[in-house]
Amino acid sequence: MLGMLDVTVRRAVAADAAAMATVWWRAATLGYEGLLPPDVVAVPDRHALTGEWRQFLAGQRAGTAIFVACTTSADQVVVGTVAAVADPVESTRGHLTALHVDPGWWGRGVGGALHQTAVWHMRRVGIRLAVAWVLDGNVRARTLFERRGWQRSSTRPAPFPGREEVCYLLTL
C-alpha cells in the first residue's frame, strides 16, 4: 500500500467495480470533452463499465494487478484506478492501462501514485518493458507519462474517427 495526503493505493476487489466504473466514466467524460465529435460515444454507460470491471477483476492472469486509489476516510471512496497487465505472449512485457482519476482529484498526485504502484508491480513480477496507449489529444495523460520517462514509440488509429493513439514505452 502506498499512502499520500489523504489517499491510499491498494489492490482492487470485486466490491470496488461500481466505484471504479464511476471514476472511469467521470474521467473519460471530462477528459475527452472536445476531442471527439459530439455524436461519438467515447465511454459506455456506468452499468456496462461496472460489468467490464467485474469481468476484469475476476479474470486476472498471473502477473496482472489492478489497483485503486481510495480516500483514507472511513468510507474509502475510490478516486482512481490503474491496471498493470501482463502480456499474454511476451512474459517480460506488460501494459499499463485504465489509469483514470476522478476529475475532482486531478492535480493532487493521485495519477502519479497509481502510476508508481503499477510500475512497481510490473518490476516486481519481472516485466522489463511497459507499454501504454494514450489518445493523441489526451494532453493530461501524455504529460504524466512523458514526465515519468516514457518514450513515444508509434501511433495507431484510435477507435474514434479522426484520432490516433500514441504508444509509450518504458524500460523497467
Image: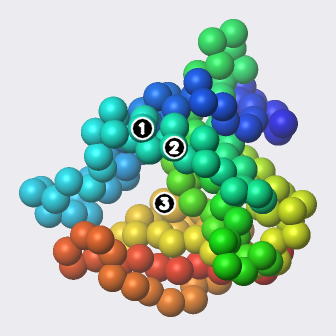
The quadrant in which residue 153 appears is bottom right
Q: Is residue 105 visible?
A: no
Q: Going from the N terminus, do you reach mark 1 or mark 3 first? A: 1
Relative to 106, residue 158 above or below: below
Q: CA distance from mark 2 to mark 1?
A: 6 Å
| Left/right of residue 47 with respect to residue 130 in the rendered view | left
Q: Residue at x 34, y 35 (%)?
A: 46
Query: Could you say whether the residue bearing mark 3 is in a helix, strand or loop?
Result: helix
Determine which residue is flagged by label 3.
140
Tell which circle, 3 or 2, labels the residue nearer the N-terminal end. Answer: 2
Quick check: 103 above or below 152?
Answer: above
Q: Which residue is mark 1?
A: 51
Quick one: 84 or 141, which is closer to the camera? 84
Which residue is depicted at the point 52% across and 32% down? 17
Circle 2: is it few (<14), some (14-19), or many (20+) Cα within 10 Å?
Answer: few
Q: Which mark is residue 55?
A: 2
Which disc, if any, is residue 139?
Answer: none
Q: Position of residue 61 (x, y in %)?
A: 69, 56
> In what quadrant of the picture does the N terminus appear?
top right
**Measured Cα–Cα span from mark 1 to mark 3:** 27 Å
Query: In front here: 140 or 48?
Result: 48
Q: Amino acid at mark 1?
A: Gly
Q: Residue 124 location in percent, x, y?
A: 89, 60
Residue 140 is at least partly visible in this image: yes
